[in-house]
Amino acid sequence: MSEILSRKSLSPNVFQITVAAPAIAAGARAGQFVVIIPATQAERIPLTIADSDQAKGTITIIFQLAGATTRLLTSLQVGEKIPHILGPLGVPSEIEKFGRVVVVGGGVGIAEIYPVVKALTAAGNEVVTIVGARNKELLIFQSELSVVSCQLLVATDDGSSGRKGFVTELLAEAIKERPVQRVIAVGPVPMMKACCDLTREAGIKTIVSLNTLMLDATGMCGVCRVKVGGENRFACVEGPDFDGHLVDFADLTSRLGTYKDLEKKADDHVCRLLRGKNG
Amino acid sequence: MAEDKTNARMRERPVAERIRDFEEVPLGYTAQQAVAEAKRCLQCKDPKCVKGCPVEIDIPAFIKLIAQGLPAEAASKIKETNSLPAVCGRVCPQEEQCELTCILNAKKAPIAIGSLERFAAEAESKENTEPRRSAAGSASIAVIGSGPAGLTCAGDLAKLGYQVTVFESLHVIGGVLQYGIPEFRLPKKIVDLEVQYVKSLGVKIVSDHLVDEIDGLLKEYQAVFVGSGAGLPNFLGVPGENLPGVYSANEFLFRVNMMKAYKFPEYLTPVKIGKKVAVIGAGNVAMDAARVSLRLGAEEVLIVYRRSRGEMPARREEIVRCEEEGVKFHLLTAPIALYPDQSGWVKEMECEKMELGEPDQSGRRRPITVPGSEFKLPIDTVIVAIGNSPNPLIIRRNPGVRANDRGGIIVDDRQATSLPGVFAGGDIVRGSATVISAMGDGKRAARRIDEYLRAAGQRL
Ligand code: FES
């Protein structure tokens, strides 16, 4: 049980909550995640730890409203408790002094890269952060990221902020400008894949953080398996970070689609429930 | 006399009724049946049955109490050595243990010890026990995992007066008893009652808590028992294995048993079952997956197994129930590839026929391919039930605990690991263990931990 201490929406569909979880905060490292069950009947969902404060015993989570279980999570107010939260899970991101590093974030990935950028900068890297969204409204975490990045570059689909176009264009330019020792990409699968295609040619090691399906998230059920370098790897215990040049993105995408057609039914059910609760 | 040749059978729900829901299949003895069965017991002076019991239940004593019409007392007798009788009465393979060694086997059917154990546990489950308090100042012990090994170890240590805390990473207590064994074989309210009993002994249980570093625990606790259970499922290693529609049995059963996906969308975790399901493997887990598939509405369920009937590792009674419920068996058959339909969902399984060659290390005859025997089976769901490795987390994060090349923690014959003060048992040691062998490990470990702490002068 963890109490929600603060809660706000960052963009129409993206929410930030800070919860009291001292044990998790004490151990959390960049790149790790928690599993949350926001209500008895809900799913176990993995969410990246966007920030943690060991002194206060809190962790911050950014998530997108993307179906039934996240809808239940958005319905919890400050002072209410999340019934179950488990973590920190997953292998922490590899943080070393690489030199010049480009970190690319898209969608909620923009918030998820924050602890990684922070840790990489603290480790003495020159970090170029590139973020992308459909429009200006969806650009989250800008001030936080600008504080910890050497350079913050923005791309939007409609040109409402920064470059009109894709993050990959900015990535290509950054690589051209000066040598890059490492790239980290976190966001929608097509974005991660596009970044990897680009860096493969340039021969720059690229790490991606995979958002596979998960259940137990403790290395027991096997649902988080994904082909990496031709072998099955398990994202909850061996990831979520993998070498992007070895990831079979088609395999990942097809597995992520397994329950797509049931999502609406679940969400409708939750909407009805919440309507009942509120009225 | 006719009734001497067989033991009394529990009543069972008829097939047509039971395959439509998740309610329990056997109904348990009536009081009359139980007393009659108990009276067949010869009350041997040197009971062979007890030697077959991994948790050392005083079997003749509890049976005598049932014969005397004292089922609650019988349950207390069982609980002197076994904290989970309602579980054992249902899922132990008694036919390979106590009932196998029953002296009556020579001439007649053995005593139905499992059914009697279940009956006694039932009679008592209605009673409430006052929580016991562990002696102040006694040593503290941490147990990692609340499955059968952990609960048994915790219960035994609490009975010895230690302060025990169990850490469970999942949101529900019971481990495989919750996520693995289906409701119709082990109702979850029975598991909850058994957990309640272990708590009443003074054991503290913390859920949603992942223990990673044992060193940290050893600062607070004088001993640690690791019962963190099963790990990553084995897969076939054939093309198409990651297609949507292909589950590991762990995943499939976790969705249905733990997350109650059979009540979707009231419960939000989905599960998809097709019309024609192939379950690969022939152990108890495979039988469970097959019977769950039927209950979720599959029209046809096949067990696909590369050896023959004689080698199937499942309990006889589970195989029989599967057959009664209409599961079909494709024996001496091994999958070699899975193919998707247009949408990417699995639609076809290519197999080859096998024949049995020379015995392998397990003593079972090794299946070998029949050349040119490939054929395709139309299917739309595949459940892979060919075992799992021990859970990877503890071993990865604690290099001080030695593990074998299959990822299992190495223990001596009394469950001690390479790290002083740390003991282990169940699936984390064995890979895929039965509930009762995990319980036996937990019991041996508890006794050993007690000795270890006494020797270290930690015992009050
Ligand atoms: S989520 Fe179950 S093994 Fe990774």
Image (cartoon, coloured by chain):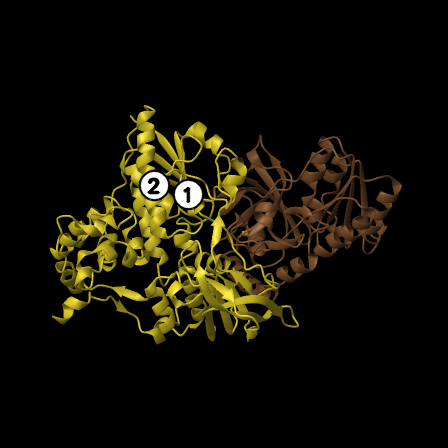
Chain colours: A brown, B yellow
Q: Going by the image, does A100 lie left or right of B13?
A: right
> Looking at the image, which residue is at 26% across and 51% down?
B52
> In this rendering, is residue B82 above or below B329?
above
Position of the C terminus of chain B, as image quadrant, is: top left
Q: Residue B403: in sight, yes or no? A: yes
Q: Residue B24: in sight, yes or no? A: no
Residue tagged by mark 1? B227
Badge 1 and badge 2 both on one subunit: yes
Q: Earlier in the sequence, mark 1 or mark 2?
A: 2
Give the Cα distance between marks 1 and 2: 9 Å
Secondary structure beneath dot 1 equals loop
> Which chain is home to disc 2?
B
Residue tagged by mark 2? B153
In the rendered image, the residue lying farthest to the top is B457
* Pick the front one: A158 or B402: B402
Q: Position of residue A65 (x, y in %)?
A: 63, 55
* Pick the front one: B338 or B183: B338
* Pick the front one: B144 or B347: B347
Residue type at mark 1? Gly
Q: Which quadrant of the structure image shows residue B86?
A: bottom left
Residue type at mark 2? Cys
Q: Going by the image, does B443 lie left or right of A97?
A: left
> Looking at the image, which residue is at 22% across and 60% down?
B112
* Pick the front one: A142 or A220: A220
Q: Going by the image, does B190 lie left or right of A75?
A: left
> In this rendering, is residue B266 above or below A77?
below
> Could you classify mark 1 by the number of other residues whose Cα lies within 10 Å: few (under 14), some (14-19), or many (20 or more)?
many
Tags 1 and 2 touching, CB below 8 Å:
yes
Secondary structure beneath dot 2 equals helix
